Amino acid sequence: MAEDKVVGGPTKEELDELQKKNGKCFKVAFSESDVFIVRRLKRFEHRNILREVQEIMRANPNDPQLASVAQEEKIVAAGLVWPVISDQTYWATSPAGFMPSLAQTIMEVSGFTDQFKIEEL
């Protein structure tokens, strides 16, 4: 990357540190000011998220939407590396599509996609 900074995101040095800590990272930009850096989930993280969501489903059998929202939130909590969002009111006031879109992107970069190559050998 020739730039000193990801546009709307971390500096080159910050990005290098994020990648050293998290492995390959991906920029998700909804606009110039709404930029996020995400990473791939590992298999054990995904399994833990599924277990936690199953517990939520068992505790709230009449509210399947709660489990879906919780799954999105847990995926984003695990896969979002920048910015660090410690104030949960950010998500309450952000556009409604950010959370599900970030969760979907994290899943896609983690290999949950139909965009791969299959070849007959």
Image: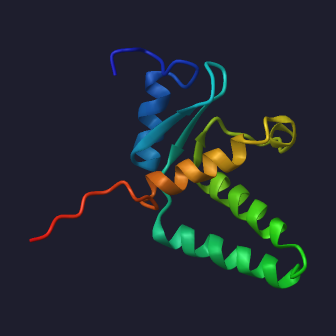
Q: Nearer the viewer, residue 3 or 69?
A: 69
Residue at the spot x=56%, y=75% of the render?
47
Residue 118 position in % (x across, y down)? 23, 64
In this rendered view, identify the residue nearer to me: 21 or 45: 45
Q: Is residue 112 left or right of residue 1?
A: right
Write down the quadrant of residue 72 in the picture: bottom right
In the image, residue 48 sits, relative to residue 92, either above or below, namely below
**Left-right relation of 71 to 6:** right
Q: Quadrant of the N terminus?
A: top left
Q: How is the image coloured?
A: rainbow
- Figure quadrant of residue 25: top left
When the figure is inspected, residue 58 is found, relative to residue 1, above or below; the finding is: below
Indicate the position of residue 21 as horizontal and vertical percent values. 45, 47
- x then y, percent, for residue 41: 50, 59
Direction from residue 93 to residue 31 in the image, left or right: left
Count the marks: how many? 0
Q: Residue furthest bottom?
A: 58
Identify the residue at horizontal 64%, vertical 75% (top origin).
50
Residue 8, located in which quarter of the rendered image? Answer: top right
Q: Residue at x 48, y 18 (%)?
A: 5
Q: Position of residue 86 (x, y in %)?
A: 77, 43
- Residue at the front extreme, as displayed: 120
For the C terminus, which image quadrant?
Answer: bottom left
Task: Between residue 64 and residue 110, name the one nearer to us.
Answer: 64
Looking at the image, the residue that sits furthest to the left is 121
Residue at 66% across, 27% down: 34
